[in-house]
Amino acid sequence: MVSPGTRNSIGFSFYGFNVRMTASDPVRLSDIAVDFSYFRTSVPGKTQTPDLEIHFYDSASRPPMPRLPAAQHTPRNVVFRDKEISYLDYGGRALARISEKGKKIEVYSDDRHLAHEAAYLTILSYTGQYFDRTGRTRVHALGLETGGRAVLLMLPSSGGKTTMALNMLQRDGVKLISEDSPLMRRDGLIEPFPIRIGVRPGTVFPDVPDSFLLDIQRMEFGPKKLIDIEFFSDRISGPVPISAILLGTRFSAGDSSIKQIARRHAFRPLVSDAVVGLGLYQGIEFVLQSSAFELMGKGRLACSRLRNCMGCLRRATVHRFEMGTDIEQTAETLAKFLKEIAAKHESVGT
C-alpha cells in the first residue's frame, strides 16, 4: 500500500527521447506501462533531466486557473493560454497544465480512463515530433517483418490491420514491426514502433493471460481491450530494410488477391498516411503553437516526411491487396505473400 503523498515513477526511452512519469496512485502508471512496455526503461535520476515529464494528480489537487479566453477548440478539449502556460480542459473532467516550454505536463483528474488516454495521446504526439526531428517518419500502416525485410500494409482506420497483425503473429517466420505506425527512414530502413494492440469488443484474438490485458474507455470511440505488446516480446522485429508496400482495399465479395502494380500508385497513400499523417495522433504540437510563423514550419516538415517516403518507395515493390469478406482466406493470402518475400531474399542472400 502506498502511503499518502508518496510518488511512484516509471520511465520510457523512445530512441533517445526520455519520458518520466509520476503518480501517487500506482494504477495510473501501470495503465500507461501497458501502452509502451517495449520502451520501458529505468527512471531518469535526479541529475538527469528527461525530455518530457508527466505527473498525475487527483482533482482535489487541481490548481485554480485564471480567467482566460479559449484559444482553441478540439473534439477532445478546449485550450487556454496564459503566456508560457497552456491549459487543456477536458469538459471539466480533467485538466492538463503544460509548462516549461512543453516539457512538463500535470494531469489533474479522478477519471482513471480519461487521465490514461490524455497521457497516452500526449506521448504519441511528443514522440512523433521527436521522430520527425531525428529523420524518422511515422506511417499509418501495419508493419511486418519476414526474411529480414519489411512489408507495410496500408489500410484506413478500422480497415483490418489489427486482425491481420494478430493472425500473422501466430505464424512462423513473421515478426511485428508495428501494428499501427512503423517508422520510415530515407535510407529505406523501417524501424519498429511496437505499442499496445487495441481490440474492439467482439474481436477474436489469441489466448492472452489477463496479466497482459487492460480494459479502457475512450473519450470518443468507446471501449477497447488493450493487449500489452510484452506478450509478443519474442515476435518483435528489429530495424529492417523495406521490401514491399501493400495497398489494401476492402471488397464486398470475392476472394482476396495480391498483385504487383506500378510504384506511382503508392504516392498518394503515402502522402495521406505519412506526410499528412492521417490516422496518426498529432495534437499537442498544435496546442503549443501560437503563431502563423510556427505553422509555416510545417512546410519544411512535409518536405522531410516526403523525402523519407520517397526513399522507401524507391526500394520497395508496390502491390494491390484486394481483400474479400472471408477473413481466413484473406489472412492466408497475406501469409503466402510473406513467405514468397522471405524466400526471395533468402535465395539471393540479402
Image (spheres, rainbow, N blue to C red):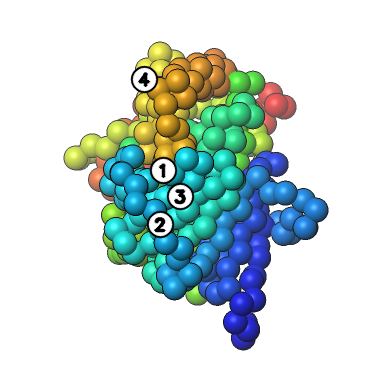
Q: Nearer the viewer, mark 4 or mark 1?
A: 1
Evaluate if marks 3 and 4 touch, with contact meaning CB atoms under 8 Å apart: no
Residue bearing mark 4: 268
> Residue 81 bears which disc, if any?
1
Side (left or right) of 187 relative to 88: right
Q: Mark 3 and mark 2 in contact (Cβ < 8 Å)?
A: no
Q: Which mark is residue 65?
A: 2
* Element assignment for label 1: strand
**Which comes before the other along the chain, label 4 or label 1?**
1
Rendered view: 334 above or below 33: above
Report which residue position mark 3 lands on: 121
Label 2 to label 3: alpha-carbon separation: 23 Å
Asked if marks 1 and 2 touch (Cβ < 8 Å), the reply is no
The kind of secondary structure element at disc 4 is: helix
Residue extending farthest left = 252
Q: Quadrant of the C terminus?
A: top right
Say what secondary structure mark 2 lies in. Answer: loop
Distance between mark 3 and mark 4 Cα atoms: 26 Å
Q: What residue type is disc 2 on?
A: Met
Q: Earlier in the sequence, mark 1 or mark 2?
A: 2
Q: Position of residue 343 (x, y in %)?
A: 61, 33
Q: Position of residue 293 (x, y in %)?
A: 45, 20
User: Which of the 4 image quadrants contains residue 81?
Assistant: top left
Task: Tell me the distance, in whole angstroms, between the alpha carbons under discs 1 and 2.
Answer: 10 Å
| Residue depicted at 40% across the width and 57% down the height | 65
The amino acid type of the residue labelled 3 equals Leu
In the figure, 1 relative to 236: above or below? below
* Disc 2 packing (10 Å; few <14; some 14–19; many ≥20): few
Distance from Cα at disc 2 to Cα at disc 4 = 44 Å
Disc 3 versus disc 4: nearer the observer: 3
